[in-house]
Image (cartoon, rainbow, N blue to C red):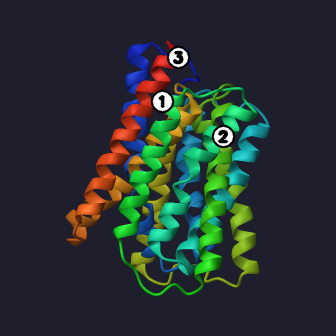
Amino acid sequence: MTDATASPNAASRAQALAVLVMGACIIGLAAILVRLSDAGPTATGVWRLVFAAPLLAIMAARTGGFGGAPSKWALLAGLFFALDLGFWHYGIQYTSVANATVLTNLTPVVVTAVAWVFLRQRPRPLFLVAVAAAVAGASMMAIEKTGGTPRNQPLGDTLSLITAVWYALYFLTMAEGRKRETASRLMFWASVTGAPLLLAAAVLLGERLVPATPRGWAACVGLGLMHVAGQGSIAWAMGRLPTPTASVVVLVQPVVAAILGYVLFAEAIGPLQGLGAAIALAGIVLGQWASRKTAS
């Protein structure tokens, strides 16, 4: 994760896709660690960025330094990511995991629409089919999962739907920022920007600010490491891939989450969930293939 964006050839594109998939797989651990944090939903986001910042600072210093004040893209990325974490964590609190997953997975739709309208990145019809397949597959995986009774489903659903918009805007600002600076520098300033915003929200909402148990502290440290490795890999790859393509590939996360649930917690993967995983993966592969043909 050292150099800035470059014109991708076949080899560099394959490398970027591999790194992107790896990052998405790592991020698939986030929900588990959030549940173990023993702190408020927004406060957990604070600790994630706080523990990530020193590592990102070291990485940025080794890859060209900070180069003065943060760019507007880094500041916007920090704002949108803070909003993403805050809305997502509370969405999970109020609605079912299934609904939160389905609604948040609408991110590629938002990214593709914004890139089309505002960035003049017109997708091929085949790519739109791929987006629909990937989102539908991820949704099928979530629908079969069961959960407790939602505390306030309309509120939770609304928060989860808005999360998709914030994450899409984060994707787009990171993609623009990667045209001008390294992934580590961009992520460092985004973390420095996002942490105070999340802390202010946690205080205003009266949350528990400090993890209550050693397990909670370990989970928060894990979130910081996961942020550097997972989001860092995604940010690096986004400098080498079309933004809509990257947003579709990241939908591998629910597939990874289902596999981890089966391996770690013996959570059964039912027929509908298995079919959804297959459709999501097919949509991801098709989206990557369609965007490659567009670029060629």
- With respect to residue 287, does 259 lie above or below? below
Residue name at image x 59 percent, y 23 percent: 4
Residue matched to label 1: 126
The amino acid marked with disc number 2 is Ala
- With respect to residue 220, does 285 lie above or below? above
Cα separation between marks 2 and 3? 18 Å
Residue name at image x 74 percent, y 63 percent: 197
Residue matched to label 3: 295
Q: In the drawing, what numbered circle is on residue 113?
A: 2
Left or right, 6 with reference to 133: right
For the residue pair 242 and 64, the one nearer the viewer reads as: 242
The amino acid marked with disc number 1 is Leu
Q: Percent position (x, y) of residue 71?
A: 77, 36
| Whether residue 66 can be seen here | no
For the residue pair 240 and 233, the one nearer the viewer reads as: 240
Q: Secondary structure at mark 2?
A: helix
Residue name at image x 24 percent, y 72 percent: 265
Q: How many marks?
A: 3
